[in-house]
Image (cartoon, rainbow, N blue to C red):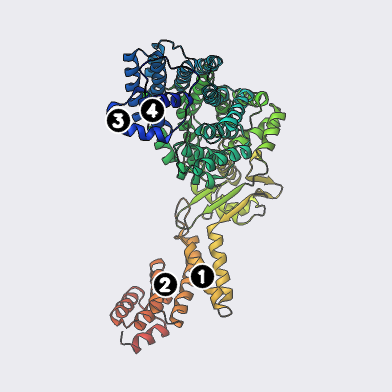
Amino acid sequence: MSLYAPPIADVQSSTALQAEQACYNLRLCPTLSKAIQQHAPSMHPWLRCYRALESRIQRGDPAVALQHALTAAADFETQGDGDGYARALAEACINRYMLGQYEKALHMLAACPQPARPAARASLAFASYVNLVGQGQLDAAISAGEAGLHALASEPDTDTRIAWTIVLQRNLCPAYHFAGRLTTARAAAELAVQLAEAYRPKSHLYHWALYEYGLLEGRAGRFELALALLRQARRLIEATGCREPLWRWVVAAEGQSLRDMGQLDGAAACYNDAGWGEGDDGPLLLWLLQGRQNEARIATEARLTAALAADSAFEIANLRVMLVLLDLEDGASPATREVLAWAAAEYARLGFRYHRASVLLHLAAVAYQMNDQAAGAAALAEALQFVAETGYRNLNWWHPRRMATLLQRAIAEGIEAATASWLLHERELLNHPLSLSIHCLGSFQLMLNGETLPEARWRGGRAGALRMQRLLLLLARNRAAHAPETIARYVWPDKYEEIDLAPNLHLTLAELRRVLEPGLEHGGDSRYIHTTADGYRLAEGLRVAIDLDEFLALVRQGSCQAGRDDETARNAFNQAIARYRGSFALAKADPIEAASYQQAYAEALGWLAEDALRTEQPQLALEHARTMLRELPLDERATLLSLRACLALGDRRTARRLYGRFIAAVGSASDELRELARRYGL
């Protein structure tokens, strides 16, 4: 029984008293859920208020919860119960926050008379806090949350006082974080966890406190601690046998930490299980890092529409930044710079220092890319000063490649060099191996450090995509330094003796370097293509994978083992044809270079077709031979193997048609082919 006497006289049933206590103590009770079903036609307002609480926390249905809370508030107002009215109204406004109805909620809260009970005042303060955060009024939100804590000091019921202290402290944590007050945020999160662990270790309050603490540490860059806290919360929620909506937020927060650690596959698995979780970014940044720009853009624009409808300045700024980051993958422009500058000013106006520092790093990269050295240095310095003051190891929209380039530049130019060096070390950006994967069979695709390079990056330059791609492929396939003359023979095969080599090579090399690193100012700073005394080469530590070379290596392995170890040869050739996704292709088709690779493909198919005939698998032999014919329609070996397979299957009609088509196209045939046709009357 609550130590605080209920102010109303008509709360007579024990069920209603239990519901009142549960609403103040924030407890979920199966007994009350059953009672609600029994009393549904004439539900007491405390039961309705509890139903709202249950629908919000356990069922994740704010629309239903809102209707129950509004009905309860109206009933309490009719009864003249000021405390009950305030508690139900607070519940309604918390749900309005979840529905994005911030202005309406704040208007209702402003009109609510102050109740007598401290816990009721604390619940109103909490409702004000979340809606003020939703509107981006950070200072006012923090003041509201702290006012709620002050009100609780006079709450006589210990359980109620502790429950609301946990709620307010864990919710103040993200506001302190947004304001860049990491130490204060961490203290609030730790206190919420300690109180919940001591007094309510089996309740949702403990799960929420662990979640908020883990989310903070992920945002701050202490990833191991973040994952430990989030996974503990996940286990506890799963142990209840009821995956309340919080479970999704916990798993999504785990994905956010994994994403910022560079573990993109693990992050994707979390987001696939959980969905979005809390906040606007969710999987958006992950999709950007994975090269899934279209998917990210569609989702961002949809969420921006909702944010504009809710008039949430903070969410609007976040989503506009996200759209700019998607544009920035194709290079900087005055428009991208303008939006980032606006966002930095908007975050300053709203008091979101963490987000201002985060966006300043991207603004610095854009300024450098547009050759505004002073503006780039100023933005970079302010962002790193924030890191130095607060101790953050992670910032929003963490883009490893861009951050590594900026931090190395800061060190080289003496811009908060100690902080930049510390952050490089903490995030292991220098130890993260660079990787480059080239696909040039079927269609050209480049993956840089696990991210697909957008096709738009290759367009618009004077050098031309084909020349840049040929240069990159040459450097990637032979890691030694290449002299300009060697490069010219491959990059300009038809006119290398006619071109003015020096300016053409300089232009192609410079544009290729900027395709790989859009923010690069000086070619000598490239992390991928180095200039040496002997010419040009890829960086020694760069890991390179090329589907063409992998395919050719398998064909060579099969050829070497054929006749010695047919099982090994068979496996190698099967892997080779699986790797061959189509003819050699860069920005434009190159039939001359493609021809030798097509012959290698035909060699693998031919051996497999003959092997299938030897092992009495004529249908498989025919499939391989027909694939050869699709690639090389006039190839005699492919025709001969097709005829042999058809005849082994007893299909003389198809064999006759194939032979006639070949003779009509070529006009002659080898002795072996003519003998086969004569023998079977083709």
Mark 1 or 3, closer to the camera: 3
Q: Residues within 10 Å of mark 3 (few under 14, many from 20)?
A: few
Up/down of 654 relative to 678, above or below: above
Give the quarter of the image for residue 393: top right
Q: Position of residue 66 (x, y in %)?
A: 35, 26
Mark 3 or mark 1, which is nearer the start of the sequence? Answer: 3
Q: State the residue position of label 4.
A: 15
- Judge left or right: residue 381 versus residue 603: right
**Kind of residue at disc 4:** Thr
In three-dimensional space, the C-alpha distance between marks 1 and 2, rounded to whole angstroms, equals: 11 Å
Q: Residues within 10 Å of mark 2 (few under 14, many from 20)?
A: many
Mark 1 or 4, closer to the camera: 4
Mark 2 or 3, closer to the camera: 3
In three-dimensional space, the C-alpha distance between marks 1 and 4, rounded to whole angstroms, equals: 75 Å
Up/down of 291 relative to 321, above or below: below
- Judge left or right: residue 294 versus residue 485: left
Is the C-beta separation of discs 2 and 3 under 8 Å?
Answer: no
Q: State the residue position of label 1.
A: 573
- Judge left or right: residue 366 versus residue 647: right
Mark 2 or mark 4, which is nearer the start of the sequence? Answer: 4
Up/down of 247 relative to 90, above or below: below
- In terms of depth relative to the viewer, which is nearer, 246 or 52? 52
**Kind of residue at disc 1:** Phe
Q: Position of residue 628 (x, y in %)?
A: 42, 70
Q: State the residue position of label 2.
A: 624
